Image (cartoon, coloured by chain):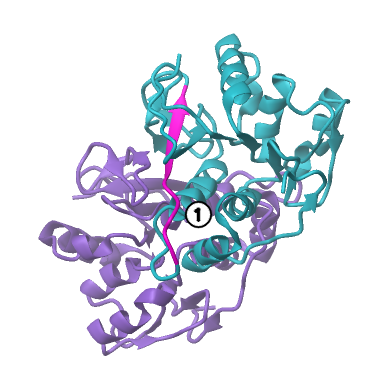
Chain colours: A purple, B cyan
Amino acid sequence: MTTSSHTDETFNIGIFLYQGVEELDFCGPFEVLKAASYTRSEKGQNPVWQVFTVAEEPGLLKTSGELLIQPHFTFHNHLHIDLLVVPGGLASSQVKKPAVLEWLRKVTSQAQLNTSVCTGAFLLGAVGLLDGHTVTTHWSALDELARQYPRARVEREVRWVDEGRLVTAAGISAGMDMSLHLVERLAGRELAEEVAHYMEYRWQEQSSHHSAAE
Amino acid sequence: MTTSSHTDETFNIGIFLYQGVEELDFCGPFEVLKAASYTRSEKGQNPVWQVFTVAEEPGLLKTSGELLIQPHFTFHNHLHIDLLVVPGGLASSQVKKPAVLEWLRKVTSQAQLNTSVCTGAFLLGAVGLLDGHTVTTHWSALDELARQYPRARVEREVRWVDEGRLVTAAGISAGMDMSLHLVERLAGRELAEEVAHYMEYRWQEQSSHHSAAE
């Protein structure tokens, strides 16, 4: 299903896109994770990360706000994904699609890290990844997430929750804070702070680290 | 040059896109300004704003991080622009293009508000809009902006500068703070706070209001 052009040197970050995806949910993490691969100038080497978008089918997608995005890959031709980012938006329309759930099961079983932003958590929940974990989502969806996934413990008023292989973020802009945390976890604190400085972004760090795989 | 489908009821917000535009520079303002048109539920009506992207020519554009974006309109078929947003990125490649400068001269002379994010300020400078004004840009470009536009006063360590018809923001993420300020200015404080809450975004407000047209 996926093209294996994965080498030991490259870490591949795939962002799932779909009709009605919330623009900042994917664009924020894209900016942060991509910047981690090119911002460093003086203090060391940047990690070799590829950041790309993947959708079910080829062709333009409309975001929730009707930006028009062309995904880099489809389910059928994308690179191996080491870190999956599932953004929110009209995620409820995606959880009903067998092809999406099949793809998510396959990719999440092979990825080193599965992450969500906002209501993207519902998509990880739909393939069973939230069960037994502490998770979060957009403030307006916390109750519904707890209702739909009673085996997950839903955390309120955090920017993200790191459960090791699973990391979930709160709503929309919190995806940037989670992504800076991922940069720190994968490539060190210094680079995460450099990326935040480059973006002129004030990193909000009030997260809970329950069972982070440090 | 521009299609006039402007009515009194609609306020049109045009975001200029080009090859190498920094993704968060345009996606942050797009998210904020678009959300202002749909987030309000209980407390009142949303303003009728159209938010769209405009590029020189049709076809896909690659952002600085190589996201693929399809602009909604070209220079030759876009709606009237009341509020122009000029994001940064590879702005230096655009200031050399006569067609871009001609378009900017025309649009900025007709718009109610001309704004920039990050190095987008250089494009407003290229058509003379910074002269005699206090302005800002990305921290790494402050000195260069002052050098290229000696008749502008370059402000440091602010998120944005509101000079009435001209509003410039600092780097990348500061475009969201400026956009929330624009929401406040155009539609009231309450809506700006609702949008920030919807986005779970902590609005950074340390700006300078020199001659804001309040």
The kind of residue on which mark 1 rests is: Gly
| Whole-percent x, y for residue A186 in the image | 54, 64
Q: Is residue B191 left or right of residue A107?
A: right
The residue lying at 38 percent from left, 75 percent from top is A140
The residue lying at 41 percent from left, 24 percent from top is B78
| Whole-percent x, y for residue A33 in the image | 52, 53
Count of marks overlaid on the render: 1
Q: Which residues are magenta?
A: B44-55
B210 over B149 or under it: above or below: below
B198 over A64 or under it: above or below: below
Q: Quadrant of residue B190?
A: bottom right
**Tag 1, which chain?**
A
The residue lying at 42 percent from left, 16 percent from top is B76
Q: Which residue occupies the foreground of this view, B6 or A176?
A: B6
Disc 1 crowd rating (10 Å Cα; few below 14, some 14-19, many 20+) is many
Q: Is residue A59 left or right of residue B191?
A: left
The answer to whether residue B127 shows anywhere in this view is yes
Residue A190 magenta-highlighted: no
B101 over A9 or under it: above or below: above
Q: Quadrant of residue B109?
A: top right
- For this orientation, the residue located farthest to the top is B98
Q: Which residue is mark 1?
A: A28
| Whole-percent x, y for residue A144 in the image | 29, 80
Quarter that holds the N terminus of chain B: top left
Q: Secondary structure at mark 1?
A: helix
Residue B51 magenta-highlighted: yes
| Whole-percent x, y for residue B16 in the image | 52, 30
- For this orientation, the residue located farthest to the front is B8
The answer to whether residue A165 shows anywhere in this view is no
